[in-house]
Amino acid sequence: MLAWPLRTLGSVAVMLAGWAAFACSGETNSSESTGGTGASGGTGGAAGTGGGAAGASNCQSDQKLCAGACASRKDPLVGCDASGCNPCVLPHATAGCSATGTCSVSQCDPDWSDCNDSPVDGCETNLKSDKEHCGACGSSCLTQLGVGAVCMAGKCEINGGKDCEKLGFFDCDGDNTTGCEVDTNTDPNNCGLCGKVCSNGQTCSGGKCQ
């Protein structure tokens, strides 16, 4: 009568051991699966970190995105407009940014000036040689000395009288500061050439006394 219950109890013990092993195996697989998810989560975290790079929305109101970084809109090295990043390049000038967001002339190179007040061509005038702007904007050699005047090293001078003579003008007083002051075509005191005076009552026309 006692043998049967013992065999039954042995079978039950074997079955319980089997279930325990199966349960342990399930826990191991679950842990591995969870670990895999953790690894994936770690990768996702890295991606999230990479996504933290500067974007236009991260820049201040007075900045813009250039080459992946926020840059000032008032920096001529990256342009002055709201979105572009091309530098301001102005001939013979140091560039700046205007209040309206355009490239402007901050400073001219030595001996150059922005006489036309346009930043597009920078400091376009050479004050050392431009006879319309000799030494300063608006300083015209033609106005100061007349026909034949040139600008030399920032000063108006007569070009050896050669340019005067081509148009019938002469530097009869030899003073460079007065330019080509005589029109020998019409001056009765210098008719045709310096010092030739027409007789009383005669006029000078075409360089001849009449």
Image (tube, grey):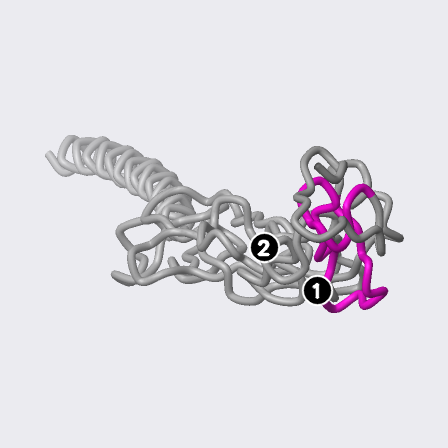
Element carrying mark 2: loop
Q: Residue at x 29, y 34 (%)?
A: 22
Q: Residue furthest left?
A: 1
Please state if 199 lies on the left or on the right of 41 as rendered.
Answer: right
Q: Which is nearer the eye, 153 or 207?
A: 207
Q: Quadrant of the C terminus?
A: top right
Q: Position of residue 86 (x, y in %)?
A: 50, 43
Q: Position of residue 174 (x, y in %)?
A: 85, 64
Magenta segment, which residues? Answer: 169-192
Could you say which quadrant of the image residue 9 lies in? top left
As drawn, the label of residue 111 is 1
> As shown in the figure, which amino acid type bears the numbered disc 1?
Asp
Read off the residue under disc 2: 123
Of residue 72 and residue 173, the one placed in the foreground of this image is 173
CA gap, disc 2 and disc 1: 10 Å
Q: Residue at point 41% right, 57% down?
A: 70
User: Could you say where residue 152 lies in the image, as x and y percent from the top left?
Assistant: 80, 59
Secondary structure predominantly adopted by residues drawn in magenta: loop
39 up-or-down from 15: above or below = below
Give the position of the N terminus as an image quadrant. Answer: top left
State the SS at label 1. loop
174 vs 193: above or below: below
Q: Nearer the viewer, residue 106 or 1?
A: 106
Residue 172 colored in magenta in the image: yes
